[in-house]
Image (cartoon, rainbow, N blue to C red):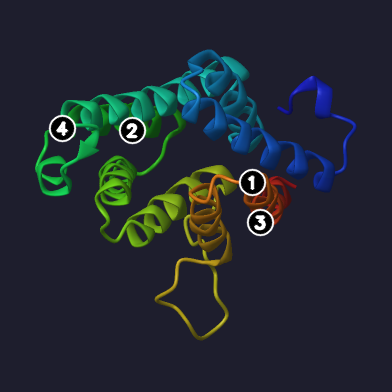
Amino acid sequence: MRDPETRDWTEQETAQHMAEQICLGFQAHDRKRRDEAIEAFGTVDALQFQHVDPETATHAATAYVDALWAKDDVEVDHMADGEIDDDDLAAADWEPVREKFRERASIVGMDPRYAELSTTAWRNHKTGRDYWTPIQRAQVIELRAAMHDEEYPQKPRYGQSGFGPEAARYALAVELHDMHTDRHWQQAMDVMVPYFEAILEAHD
């Protein structure tokens, strides 16, 4: 069920709102504003996971935020003189992060592989390794749960090894986030609108 404030919106307006909120969630994380992050990600989860009630969606969002905060804790524990040792961080114990992603997956009924893929993605993101492959694999799992479509992406013929346009959009949005400019944040929001439109269309 959609948030009451969006019930009269078009799908495009709702998708725009979701794109804004997911970006606000990551901005809140960057600024260490946990409650704001939960509120923003909770708004997104309530709209994308319509098979759960709003309270459950908030729990899923909280688990996601807890995973991001656990990630930060691991990073701080492997920092020396203000710099992260990539090899040391890569070899660190990431189980606290994995546990929270596992919790999120369980709450909304996602394939549990989501937890390992998301953990690998964020570890690699911080250590200069390939994060875009596991993050897209993780998003395929999340998209399948949100869309109730275990066959996503349903490509007509070629490019079957790809992860689908929506998962690719998510990875691009992370790249845009990494630039940390207002212009790139706006581009990230714009990129994510069709991502959420696809989810909302699948709900119809």
Among the 4 quarters of the image, the one containing residue 45: top right
State the CA–CA distance, disc 3 to disc 1.
Answer: 10 Å
Q: Dot 4 surroundings within 10 Å: few (below 14), some, or many (20 or more)? A: few
Rendered image: mark on residue 101: 2
Tell me the SS state at disc 1: helix
Residue 45, placed above or below residue 32: below
Q: Amino acid at mark 2?
A: Phe
Q: Residue furthest bottom?
A: 158
State the CA–CA distance, disc 2 to disc 1.
Answer: 25 Å
Tell me the SS state at disc 4: strand
Write down the residue under mark 3: 191
Rendered image: mark on residue 80: 4
Among the 4 quarters of the image, the one containing residue 104: top left
Q: Amino acid at mark 3?
A: Val
Rendered image: mark on residue 185: 1
Front residue of this view, candidates 189 and 44? 189
Q: Amino acid at mark 4?
A: Ala
Tell me the SS state at disc 3: helix
State the CA–CA distance, disc 3 to disc 4.
Answer: 36 Å
Instruction: Give residue 169's position: percent from left, percent from top.
Output: 57, 59
Query: In the rendered image, is residue 50 in sight?
Result: no
Query: In the rendered image, is residue 191 in sight?
Result: yes
Q: In this rendering, which labeled residue sits more in front, label 2 or label 3?
A: 3
Q: In this rendering, which labeled residue sits more in front, label 3 or label 1?
A: 1
